[in-house]
Amino acid sequence: VDAISILGGMVVAKINLDISFGEFLRRFREAVEMKHIIIGLAKAPIFGFLIGLIACFRGFEVKNTTQSIGIYTTKSVVNAIFWVIAFDALFSVVLTIMEVKCIKRKILSPDLEIKLSMMESVLKLTKTKFLGF
């Protein structure tokens, strides 16, 4: 699905904006991080499994009438839409928290603290040596 979406974007950009395929791909690589593509590819099978699980669960509830098929099919679709949106929101929250923790870890890493203390020492030395205070 991701590849088809990218291909569709390339075709639209070529037709409407006269952007070559090579230029589109170059700009695409600049604009989209690889982690977003990986996350999209990872979520697709999870959502597919979730939809199949909900459909099977609702399918087991069908009674011996043709009306119940329509009722439980509708319930299945509504439940699947709800749970896909809920899981997508959950993924977003979890991935955002993980990204914030990674950023904090990078910022508060021991190497950075050493570099900051070295910079402070250099600034103090510069102030006392050259500026006299």
Image: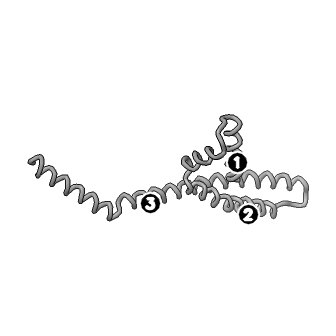
Helix or strand or loop: what does disc 3 sit on? helix
Which residue corresponds to mark 2? 53
Which residue corresponds to mark 3? 102
Q: Tell me what residue is drawn at x 58 percent, y 47 percent.
A: 26
Of the residues tagged 3 and 1, which is closer to the observer? 1
Helix or strand or loop: what does disc 1 sit on? helix
Q: Tell me what residue is drawn at x 35 percent, y 63 percent.
A: 109
Residue 42 sits in which quadrant? bottom right
Residue type pointed to by label 1: Leu
Of the residues tagged 2 and 3, which is closer to the observer? 3
Place of residue 113 in the rendered image (x, y in percent of width and height, measured from the top left): 29, 61
Residue type pointed to by label 2: Leu
Q: Is 31 on the left or on the right of 70, as rendered?
A: left
Q: Is 107 on the left or on the right of 61, as rendered?
A: left
Q: CA distance from mark 2 to mark 3?
A: 33 Å
Q: Which one is earlier in the sequence, the residue at label 2 or at label 1?
A: 1
